[in-house]
Amino acid sequence: MPGPACYIDDRVFTPSTRRAARQPPELPALGGHFPRAQLTFLLQLAYSGELAATRAYLGHRWSLQEATERAELGKIIRDEVRHRHCLLDQLAELGSRPVPFRERKMERVGRAISTFCQVGGWFFPMYGAARLEAQNIREYEAAARLALAARFHHFIDPLLDMAEVEWDHELYFRTKASSHPFWRFVPKWPVPPGRERIRTSFEEYERARDRPVQLVRAPWLVR
Ligand SMILES: [Fe+2]
Ligand SMILES: [Fe+2]
């Protein structure tokens, strides 16, 4: 069974198992400036990522023919907006704020995807959304681990809650996309472990003696 660090393995948020440079070798990385800076950076990325997702899903919803699907997308959009509010509060507690240039960039990205959804048919928006949501699960799991390392313990539950909601979103979009004949022809991503693994994986990480600090790197699209 892969450990938590393996599960966070991703091309987007680099799963460095390297120890933080400022970490004393005899201690796990707890508290201090480095985990807090990494957490802040990750929450800024997540905040702007949620903006792109919200804009994209608004266009996606508009393109859908079925009222049921439009209602389902509406619920997902409301989830993403709630995530933005939560992240904004957490950034404020960290003494930080969203990065304006990244907000503008992700606004444009979201609007571009939204436009694509108008002309891209039914399948590709569902497929793309599922891939995006798979990344979002890992993003919030990584953020919860950083919150532990940075000693912002009250962030952990909300971050794991958001990971669980993203898990629901991934399942929804993947189930939709996989019902389409095109599904056979497109590259797949690893199916996320069961929803309960989000909590158990975090608990394993929490109990571990050695807790490497995640090194966060921005995906090329949002740099
Ligand atoms: Fe979200
Ligand atoms: Fe989502």
Image: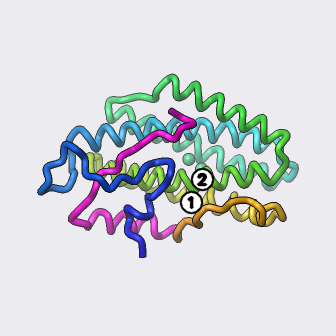
Dots 1 and 2: beta carbons under 8 Å? yes
The yes-or-no answer for disc 2 within 8 Å of ligand 2 is: yes
Considering every residue shown, the one lying at the far right of the view is 65
| Helix, strand or loop under label 1 | helix
Specify the amino acid type for callout 2: Glu
Look at the picture and state if 171 lies above or below 93: below
Residue 43, by quadrant, is top left
Q: Nearer the viewer, mark 1 or mark 2?
A: 2
Q: Magenta segment: does it hold 222?
A: yes
Q: Mark 2 sits on what residue?
A: 133
Specify the amino acid type for callout 1: Trp
- Labelled disc at residue 167: 1
Front position in the image: 143 or 154:
143
In the rendered structure, which segment of residues is drawn in magenta? 195-223
* Residue at screen point 82% across, 63% down: 180
Report how far apart the C-alphas of labels 1 and 2 lie in the structure.
Answer: 7 Å
Image location of residue 23, percent across then percent down: 18, 47
